[in-house]
Image: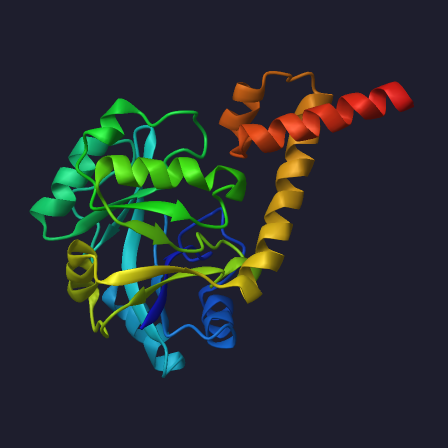
Amino acid sequence: MLLDMHVHTTAYSDCAQMSPYEMAERAREVGLDGVVITEHNAIWSDEEIAELRRLFPGLAFFRGVEVSAKKHHVLVYGLTDFTGFEAGMPVQEVVALAHERGAVAVWAHPLQYSLAPHPEGLQAGFDACETRSINIDRLERDRYRKLARRLGIPEMANSDAHHTLTLGAYATRFWHPVKDEKEIAEAIRQGAFTPEERFRWSKPASAMREKLWHRRIRGMLAKGIKDPVEIKRRAGASLQRIRRIMEREVGRQYTT
């Protein structure tokens, strides 16, 4: 069963650029069996998810949430309400509350804006680690994989889609069908899944993301921001990519 497990829509995520209906249509187009909707700090109601299921029979829709913890983003699977969570909570409290409620906690893009994982994250007790997504620079995937191995937890790959073009670029293939949020959490606990990059969809999605990174980095350089670490903190691209762009921009200055 193939699910994209990290997806945002305009229903509750201000940063998203696709409506729930556009998301569902695209999920069908790219051959997903279903989607786990992980809005920022909000979980869809029973009525909302039931309506989406009614409108798009044949696709499976589940609920999760991306909690904006202090210094970390945490994907929580296995719950159908946001009770007890709030943005800005310490990451250890988010993970502990998820476990207390029978859910699992996945470390979302842990190195996107920093050179090293925060100590609090290393000690939080995550159940899995996101190592591939459209917002994880492919030039530093090895760092993510080493982090997952260091923690002894499974790797996950999901799109982190905010736009229809990126939906389904990465996904999770569960070894057995899952029928609800609790079964998803249990499958993650057991490691009964395989992370997948779907190259037909990831190549154009990655090209779009890289163009956005390049535009943003060039904009920072134009404003006089020259520290690669500071640029990474703001843009989320790898240091390798940032330095390449900086070298290219310096070369242009000398040839104009």
Image height of 109 relative to 221, above or below: below
> Which quadrant, please, contains the C terminus?
top right
Look at 23% across and 32% down and name the residue there: 91
Count of marks overlaid on the render: 0
Question: Please, which residue is most extreme toward the right here?
Answer: 256
The residue closer to the viewer here, 91 or 2, is 2
Give the colouring mode of the picture. Answer: rainbow
The answer to whether any part of residue 73 appears in the image is no
Percent x, y of residue 181: 20, 64
58 is higher (above) or lower (below) than 135? below
Work out whether residue 118 can be spotted. yes
Q: Residue furthest left?
A: 100
Residue 120, picture quadrant: top left
Q: As drawn, is 247 to the left or to the right of 177?
A: right
Which image quarter holds the N terminus? bottom left
Query: Measured from the top left, where is residue 48 in percent x and y?
Result: 32, 67
Where residue 99 appears, as percent x and y from the top left, is 11, 46
Judge from the rendering whether residue 85 lies leftward or rightward of residue 148; answer left or right: left
Q: Going 73% across and 23% down the picture, which residue do you hit?
A: 222
Q: Is residue 141 above or below residue 29?
A: above
Residue at screen point 62% across, 44% down: 210
Report the residue at 90% width, 23% height from top.
255
Question: Relative to 122, is 237 on the left or the right?
Answer: right
**Occupied quadrant, residue 211:** top right
Q: Nearer the viewer, residue 39 or 158?
A: 158
Q: Estimate the x, y position of residue 2 in percent, counting from the top left.
A: 35, 70
